[in-house]
Amino acid sequence: MNGRVWPAVCAALATLGAACAMLPLVDRTSWILQAALLLTVQSAVGVVARRVPLAAPLTIALQAVTSLLLLTVVFARGQAVAGVLPGPDVLQHFDHLLRESLDDIGRYAIPAPATVALRLLLVGGVLLVGLVVDALAVTYGGAAPAGLPLLALYSIGAGLAKGGSEWLLFLPAAAGYLLMLLAEGRERLSRWGRVFGGQPPSADGPAAIGAGRGPSPVRTGHRIGALVLGIALVAPAALPSIGGGLLQPRGRGDGPGGSGGTISAVNPLVSLQNSLNQPENREVLRYRVAPQGGQDLYLRIVSLDRFDGASWRASERRITNVPMPMLPAPTGLAPEVRADPVGMSFAAADGYAQNYLPMPYPAQSVDRLTGKWRYEPEGRTLVGDHGQTTRGLRYEVAVLRVQPTAAQLAAAPAPPEALLREYTQVPGNVPAVVARTAREVTAGAANAYEQAIRLQDFFAVGGGFRYDTEVRSGSGHDAIARFLEEKRGFCVHFSFSMAAMARTLGIPARVAVGFTPGSPQADGSMSVGSKDAHAWPELYFEGAGWTRFEPTPSRGTQPEYTVAQAPTVPDPGAPVPAPSRRTVPSAAPSVDPACPPEQRKLAGCPGPASRASATEAGGSTSPLTVAGFALACLAALALPLLPMLWRIRARARRLGGARSPGEPAARTLAAWRELTDSAWDYGIPPDDSRTPRMAADRIVVAARLEGPAAEAAGRVATAVERTLYAPGPSPAEGLVGDVELVRAGLHASAAPRARLRARLAPRSAVRVVRAAARRRAAAGAALRSGPVGRAWRRGGAALRGIAAGLRTGRRG
């Protein structure tokens, strides 16, 4: 029994093809390369085990143990024995990561961040399916049933991914499965002898006798496979699909335009972080404000009001037709609170296609709105129905600019019991440190308003927090506790944490997601870009309704009613504050905040100045480290320039050889190679099937060369033809100048982008890769035919003989 290499390769390719359906699920695709590498090792172990040969169960067990070792090295090296062998700590670590991955699946929107837990789930799942497919299709020789695990793997990705183009990911899965079936069919036919695959060459033979000549089974199988694949690709495109987006409206039988239906939302954390980390601030919409003002209004999309201890989500609520001409009055807004009407007109960009409508809160009316839109009363949100998006949309909004005073918020009565009960729910799995920190920060506050102000200032000013969009998004029920400890995050962390802490204090709270006001433009409009995406907490105060706060440092603007704080009643038991450092300078050196309390009592903590001097005295970096770092930086900078450097060197060598005396044929062919490579750099690949004259004409036509450049290309082609076909080739003069003329013509006729690529990333540099591949193939062939290859074959034969002897002994 041989190792069945080709069926094993086809099984691995089919598994990877099905795994491609899960690429849209996470924001980074590097995990598929990791899975491909580990799956290759797993399949190679199976090939070797079958070549020995081992029994089928032992082969599968050996592959499973190999997969466990690989996953241990990649995901749990720190917990493994000697960094390789899995032990109880490794299993416990895997259990923790799998539990965390299940939390991440329910928490994150698609695409989710490629956390370690999700990567383990993806890579481990691919290895498991690959093991089952290899066992069914290769070890036990049944390729057809192996399609079931492949279908399961593909269905997971296809069922969760959103968007209209993911059906194309069916192609690699289907192609891999058909390839696996073809490999099995050919192997079975080969056991009967020569594989037949076509008509006999003569119509006079026996095959021509009868009514007609039927097609070969192999070709028939190809046609059937192509037909089935075509049906599978066309059918999904013709069937209705489920729409995607941050919000998904789902009707409940009321029909278009009815008053029924529900709306649900997913966690926007990942989409928000991706928008903030985009290198380019792409404009999503523009708007104009009426002269009465309102440039500081945030553009709200959706509110997240359900807190499960690990994330904030929007509750599932009923949606209705958009009320006309006015939207209902906002909840909790009293007549004595100032609310100025503001008119705004919006124009969404053509590339901004979402099924929710950005507008300030609370909106009074929406006019000139085209398309199918529905209204969610609780969040006062407009949602597109049946695939309606904001792409290129123009609309007008009348909004109330609510401006409560600090005194009004401080004197706000208790909210209604139903609202208080719904919006102050805190699950029991929230770490105790969240509520404890909220009580410590707001100690001594006289009312809910002062508690909200102290929470906002704790995050934005006095708590030592730092704004950082590169920080991990966080997951699990202890995400807020980790954020309070690490004190690094972006708007989602700040808004989620402040809203959760407000709820522990009995203040109704939710989180709003949308955009900050944007940037003013020269024409008087406001431009909102992807980097203006933002999240902020909304706290409820009776009389003012849902009120915006801004805890995120260096983002947005804090409302006026949060800056002018109401006077607080002094606590008689509070200590008298010490004089300010700005007025009374300290004579003692400052103590490092990271110094342990025990060491502070012993006066053993050096100040920052002492530590700095100590570093200058004895902690300087070694010259070898500096040199190594400098070399690494130079290598990183030089790596992208390697194709350009190789091209310059190759051009100098070829044209230099064309100038120097030597073999005329070699000089002419070197000049011709430089000309064709120069055309390749500008997007005209070489075609070795053409004659030199035809190749030169092709370059002239494709590059639109005229005058001296076209004539120079013809002269070089003529010199090459004389070199290749004349009995005694004569030296050609002026080849270097002709090649330079052609290069100048190519450069002049190319677009600026093509010129830049031809200089910095020349296409002809791929010759280096091809040459290396040829050398590697030659070395492999030499190795296989040499002593090492012969020893490997003899070792394999000896192992097979030992295994055969063991089987004979067991039978005896």
Image (spheres, helix red, strand yellow):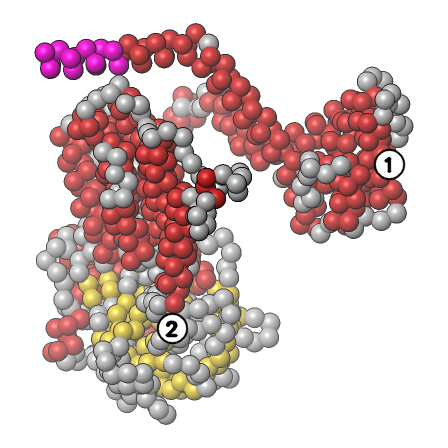
Query: Residue at left 33%, top 37%?
Result: 184
* Residue occupying image coordinates x 41% and y 34%: 195
> Which tag, 2 or 1, sits closer to the chain's start?
2
- Asked whether, in this view, residue 273 is left or right of residue 106, the answer is right
Q: In which quadrant of the rendered view does residue 76 lie?
A: top left
Residue at image x 40%, y 9%? 790
The residue under label 1 is 715
The secondary element bearing badge 2 is classed as loop
The one of 251 and 435 positioned closer to us in this rendering: 251
Q: Main secondary structure of the magenta part?
A: helix
Q: How many marks?
A: 2
- Kindly identify which residue carries mark 2: 387
Judged by depth in the image, the label closer to the viewer, 2 or 1, is 1
Q: What is the spatial separation of the Cα atoms under label 2 and label 1, in whole angstroms? A: 61 Å
Q: Image height check: is 393 above or below 234?
A: below
Quadrant of the image containing the C terminus: top left
Q: Is residue 102 visible?
A: yes
Residue 421 position in % (x across, y down): 12, 73
